[in-house]
Image: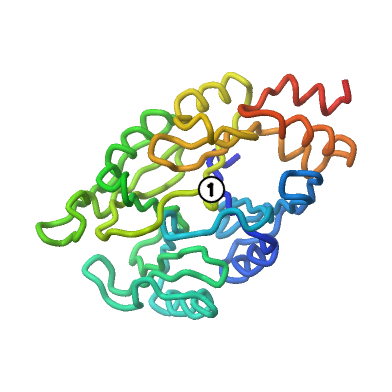
Amino acid sequence: MQKIVPHLWYDKEAKEAALFYISLFEQSRLLNVTIIGDTPSGDSEIVDFELAGQRFSAISAGPYFRFNPSISLMVACESIEEVNIKWKALSEGGSELMPLGEYPFSRWYGWVQDKYGLSWQLMFTENTQNVQKITPNMLFSNEVCGKAEEAVKYYTGIFEDSETGTVSRYGEGEAENSKAEVNYAGFKLDGFSLSAMDNAYDTDFGFNEAFSLMVYCKDQKEIDYFWDRLSAVPEAEQCGWLKDRFGVSWQIVPEYMDNILFNGSEAEIRRVTEAFLKMKKFDLEALEKARKGD
């Protein structure tokens, strides 16, 4: 099971967006769709899907959070043609953040925000054999600019099977923001590839709940472990969600939750939903009692 799953928050378009993304990548499919009722957002649609064999999750839960470039999806493309095809599809109705073209770090690259607001970095990568196709990229901006390398060390110290890869730094005069240090840092958490960058420019956006990272846990001990090490903003703790000291949102969830939400009876889903909406950190014993109707 994929330990870390990117989670995307939409107003009403989660399934529509998932099907659109599925159409752009090979080895992609819709896994599950379910409705959970009576949430603070009303009836919320949960969508699980795969892109290039990687699992993603999305929710339609109201217009509370909006995507911005603080976390984008970096795509390793096998050819310039692949970059161009995906660029055409993703840019329709969207906006260009960095124009498609040749850069010192790539022969063909572009950064685009799609029609739903999600950001993508499309890059021609000459050797993709051992490269994860889609890599979430964290852009450290504003008050956390300059902390990308600190964050990488922090995260890799928490997760097993973790490592730091290439770390590249801005040269003199390359970044307008004097706090920016790292222009790219690759790392893995539990074998899942991510990357981080300090923002070279001053911006008005930062991390928010629109893009979070779900961590699937096998038992209460593991839930407690990640919660204690990642949560740094008490007021952000709700329904398994937390924020770390850099402002990145995480969801610490039990592995069996998906089985309940996608395969449970209507009554089980309702009882479990009622139970976890009252929680901050998930309590597996209480959730199981709710599932059984105890």
At x 39%, y 69%, the residue is 111
Tell which of 56 and 232 is nearer to you.
Answer: 232
Q: Quadrant of residue 26?
A: bottom right
Image quarter (top left, top right, bottom left or bottom right) of the C terminus: top right
Above or below residue 218? Residue 197 is: below
Residue kind at label 1, given as amino acid type: Glu
Q: The residue tagged with tag 1: helix, strand or loop?
A: loop
Badge 1 local density, few (<14 within 10 Å), some, or many (20+)? many
| Of the pair 285 and 54, the residue shown nearer to us | 285
**Percent of width and height locating residue 124:** 36, 70
Q: In this figure, which residue is indicated by the disc labeled 1?
A: 209
Give the position of the N terminus as an image quadrant.
Answer: top right
Determine whether 200 is above or below 226 in the image.
Answer: below
Going 28% across and 51% down the picture, which residue do you hit? Answer: 198
Colouring of the image = rainbow
- Residue 208 percent location from the top left of the image: 49, 49
The residue shown at (31%, 78%) is: 101
Taking 5 as reference, is 47 left or right? right
Give residue 69's position: percent from left, percent from top: 42, 60
Q: Residue at x 22, y 51 (%)?
A: 180
